[in-house]
Structure formats: C-alpha cells, structure tokens
Image: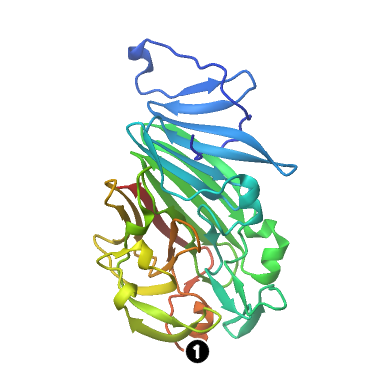
Amino acid sequence: MGIFSFRRSGGRRWHHALRIGISCVLFGLSTILTNADGEKTMAHTTYSVVVETVSVLGSKYQVYYIQQDGKAVAEIVPALGNNCYAFKVADGDTWLNLIDAPPDLATLEERPTAYGNPILFPFPNRIRNGMWQFEGETYQFDKAPDSPTTIHGLLLNLPYQVESHVADENGATLVCSLNSQDFPDVGRQYPFPFRLEITYTLKDAVLTMGIAIKNTGDRNMPVGFGIHPYFSVDLGTEANAAEAIITVPAAKYWELDEVLVPTGAQHNVADTLDLRHGQPFAKLKLDHVFTDVQLVNGVSRCLIENRDTGYGMVMESDAQFRELVVYTPPDRDAICFEPYTCPTDAINLEARGIPAGVIVLAPDETFSGTVRFMLQ
C-alpha cells in the first residue's frame, strides 16, 4: 500500500472492486472503486490512492497509501507532521524498504524525529539557546530549560490539511498544506505567517517530494527548510549492512562545537568524512553538516549501495539544498541523508556576518524545492 492522496475517504479493507472489460470504453479513463464501508480509491491504469483509518493510543489517524500496483507504495500520515513514514519498491516478488519505517504509528507519534521523513521548518536542526535575530528584532523559540538548543523546527507533529489527490497515467499524487495562522503557538514563536504545501508524487517507482513555502504576511520572512529521512542500509534479505557503500557528494563540512552547533569554520573533507567516492557503512559514525555540495545536472545524489545483493538507493536534491546533514542513528542499520537549504543555526551565523544561506521571502513570495527517492 502507499500514501499519496488528498481527499478524505473511509477506512478499512476493500471488499470488492468493479471491473469493466470493455477496453475501448475505459481507455484513458480513471475509475472510482468503492468498498462496502464506503472507502474510495481513485485508480488509473496501475496507480491508485487508498485511505485507511488507523487507531493509535485512543486517537485515529488517516493514512494515505500512494501506490503503483506491484511496483511501489508510499505511506503518509498527514495528521502527524505529514510524515511519509514508509516507502517500498519491488523488484519482482522482492519488496525493499527504502525508508526506515517505525514499528507502528504509536512509536512515530512518540518519536516524530526518529523514523520516516520528518519535515523541518522554519529552521532545520538546532538554534543556539532557541534565540535568533532578524532585521533588528530578537525572537525566542520554546525549549527545555536544561537544553542548550531548540531542534528541528515547530511542525513535527502538527496536522496538515489534505488538499487533493489524484491517480492517473501521470502517477499518484497527494497534496497537503499547513497554514501557520491555524496554530497560535507557531505564530507566537515565529511571527511570520506562511503557507507550506507538500506534494508527494509516485511515478515509475520514483517518489518525488515537492515543497512550496509562501510568505502570506506583510513583511520579509527568514526561511530555512530541511527534511530528516531515514533510509535502510540493508536492501535485500541477504544484505550485509556493514558492507554497504555510502556516497555523499560534499567537499566540505562545518566545524561543530560541543552542542553540535557550527562555530562558523569549514574544513575540507578527509578520511572517513570524505564520502564522495563511497565509504563502508561500518566505518561511519556521523552527525555532521556537510557543505560545498556537488551537483550534476542540477541535482546532488546521495547513494546507498548493497553490492552483495545488487540493490541501491538514491536520494536526489535540487540546487536549493546547499547542505547535507548525514547522521547514523546508534544501533540501527539506517542512515539519514538530510537535505537542508542552510546549515544548523544559520540565522545566528548570518548575524555574525557568516554567509549561511538563510532565504528571505518578500510578502507573497514563494520558495520551492524538490527531493526524489528511488531504487537503483
């Protein structure tokens, strides 16, 4: 199953599907399939969108499954930060988990940054002391009293609105949005009204994530955006994760202090931090902010290669993403490739005169970017 859809539908299993065998009538048309409980799926050729209601610790969440029949499926839960928490691709009868999924949605609800594909906004990663300045004013994010930073933005568990979904010959697509003015706690900490729209599209077993952020206020808005996807390092039942080759096309990294905030200095990659030509997963212990990202045909490409099984995974990010955080979560056969538009604590680096890629959107201006995930 997969999760790219945008219209609310009912929620259990399919009991029947209507099939009409007159191809000259049906050619090029989509079909609505409805089960006995009222669940609907839009389908065209091999693509479909299914919505299912899942109970989690007394709450109910609608999960959207975007799928290419027998080829790929993505699972998204808009009400939990619009997290695409699973993405599977098939090679014949073998299904491969590209995204490292949580054991269940209860775990994702409790640990929203630990699985799937968390969305980080209005700034990715950490802000020192939760405090920052912009155009002569000082702002404060909430943080735990004993924490030296705030981390991963304000939207992790917030519900997104499902705007639309469609399944046709162009693939299966789910569009969700979040309007900051619907969330007073966001506006209190980040008083810059915005609308964030995420479009997930599955086409030819490639999952594309389109991002659009619009400044809906009447003054300049500082922006930093990132995602925090977890990827499986053992692709295939016989894969040895330790021998997986990890490739990241970055020539430099930011020096971090004891609380993992950049000092402002950058260094050339070397030894196991030089991932441009691949390093074995077993050698890596990373929580690093890489920069000077190398593009080919307008995109950067991070890779996992399981040469023992012949499978690989690729994440492509467009030129808007000038940083790549690479993180190896302890005791897991997983790695995070995190495309960012700016480094950790970028707004404070720029206040010190260090260029750090903070995007400033004028009123009504929109930022857009694209990331893709695929089997290689």
What crowding class fits label 1: few (fewer than 14 Cα within 10 Å), some (14-19), or many (20 or more)?
few
Residue 140, image x, y percentages: 67, 77
Residue 296, image x, y percentages: 24, 62
Q: Quadrant of residue 35?
A: top right
Camera-nearest residue between 170 and 120: 120
Q: Is residue 37 above or below residue 316?
A: above
Camera-nearest residue between 10 and 215: 10
**Colouring:** rainbow
- Asked whether, in this view, residue 304 is left or right of residue 101, the answer is left
Tally of numbered tags: 1
Helix, strand or loop under label 1: loop
Question: Looking at the image, which residue sits at the far right?
Answer: 58
Camera-nearest residue between 71 and 258: 258
At a point 38% along the width and 10% down the height, the residue shown is 21
- Asked whether, in this view, residue 82 is left or right of residue 291, the answer is right
Q: Is residue 31 above or below residue 25?
A: below
Quick check: can you spot residue 68? yes
Q: Is residue 321 above or below residue 253?
A: above
Residue 373, image x, y percentages: 38, 50
Which amino acid, mark 1? Arg
At a point 51% along the width and 45% down the height, the residue shown is 175
- Asked whether, in this view, residue 200 is left or right of residue 114, the answer is left
Q: Is residue 235 above or below residue 317?
A: above
Identify the residue position indicated by label 1 in the image: 352
Question: Looking at the image, which residue sits at the far bottom?
Answer: 352
Residue 37, image x, y percentages: 65, 21
At a point 24% along the width and 60% down the height, the residue shown is 297
